[in-house]
Image (spheres, rainbow, N blue to C red):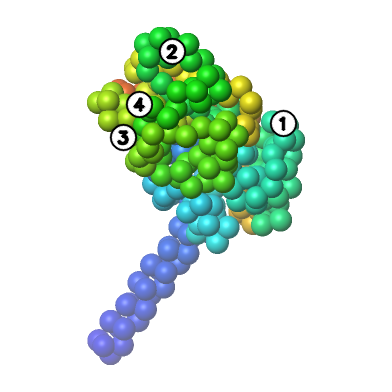
Amino acid sequence: MKNKFLLGLVTILLASLLSGCIFIEKESLRLGSRNNTESIILSHVMGQLIEDQTDIEVIYKENLGGSSVVWNAMTNGHIDVIPDYTGTIVVTYYHEEPGTADETLEMTKKLVAEDGIVAFNTFGFNNTYTLAFDEAKAEELGVVTFSDFAEHAEDFILGSVFEFIDRPDGLPGFEKEYDIQFKDVKGMDHGMMYRSISADEVDVINSYTTDGQLQVYDLRVLEDDKSYFPPYHALPLVRAEILEEYPEIEDVLKQLEGMIDEEAMQIMNGKVDNDGMMVEIVAREFLEEIGLIDKE
């Protein structure tokens, strides 16, 4: 009798644990992000707003890797929500030609829908590729645009994130469009680029227009005078089946439409990269500032 009682008790406990796991899984949302500050911040902005306005638990899957790694995780159902960029989606994932900002957004929505993903309207900012060059040297040479720089590029070393070197909308096409030939190209992680140019290990870097480090380094951001790079407007992506299960997410994420401009994103990136603030705090402070969640 004692053994039967113990067996029954173990069975009940196991059933309770399993039912609890099922409940947690059902009410959980997995937010993925790339291995860069901006992606992680945007993930937390979305996640904290969802948790504040719903009963859904958010699980953060941070630093998953480059854009293709995160995209594969999304399309394979390993994560549910991500921030991404219109130009990256159209050009890198689907190998289509982008258009204007509005056209590229509409193409994004149509293309991802074929893979069971819903693209929302953009957060508001365009984080495109650019070149950043020492301000004093740029002034000396009279370099303002990419075309200006092309005349001197063979004397300078480019520091670039690895992904930019290989992407079809990255370095290969850029060099062809502007007839640019660098003295050398050094691949590195994003965080290393600014330290490398500060240490004179490279002469120019392929920065992003919302990089927080641009606030503290004396660099000139050069103009893409041929408009080579497509629009890279950031936006939320959610798997369609998740929206069917949790329809309340749609109204939550729509509140972020047009709420983050380039300056606001650069400031948030800077708070993390320059000031060492925690991503969670930066995201919450932003949501409080724009009035989407109450101040603690």
Q: Residue 137's x, y, as percent? A: 38, 14
Q: Earlier in the sequence, mark 1 or mark 3?
A: 1
Numbered disc in front, either 2 or 3: 2
Amino acid type at mark 4: Asp
Q: Earlier in the sequence, mark 1 or mark 4?
A: 1
Q: Earlier in the sequence, mark 2 or mark 4?
A: 2
Amino acid type at mark 3: Met
* Residue on which the image places disc 3: 192
Q: Confirm whether residue 17 shows in the render.
A: yes
Q: Earlier in the sequence, mark 2 or mark 3?
A: 2
Name the secondary structure under disc 1. Answer: loop
Q: Which mark is residue 203?
A: 4
The residue carrying pointer 1 sits among few (fewer than 14), some (14 to 19) or many (20 or more) residues within 10 Å by Cα, namely: few
* Residue drawn at (60%, 51%) of the image: 93
| Closer to us: 117 or 185 | 185
Q: Are marks 1 and 3 in contact (CB under 8 Å)?
A: no
Q: Residue 121's x, y, as percent? A: 67, 35
User: Where is the C terminus found, in terms of image quarters?
Assistant: top left
Amino acid type at mark 1: Thr
* Residue drawn at (53%, 24%) of the image: 146
**Vertical relation: 60 (above or below) 218:** below
* Residue on which the image places disc 1: 100
Marks 2 and 3, Cα distance to the nearest angstrom?
A: 26 Å
The residue carrying pointer 3 sits among few (fewer than 14), some (14 to 19) or many (20 or more) residues within 10 Å by Cα, namely: some
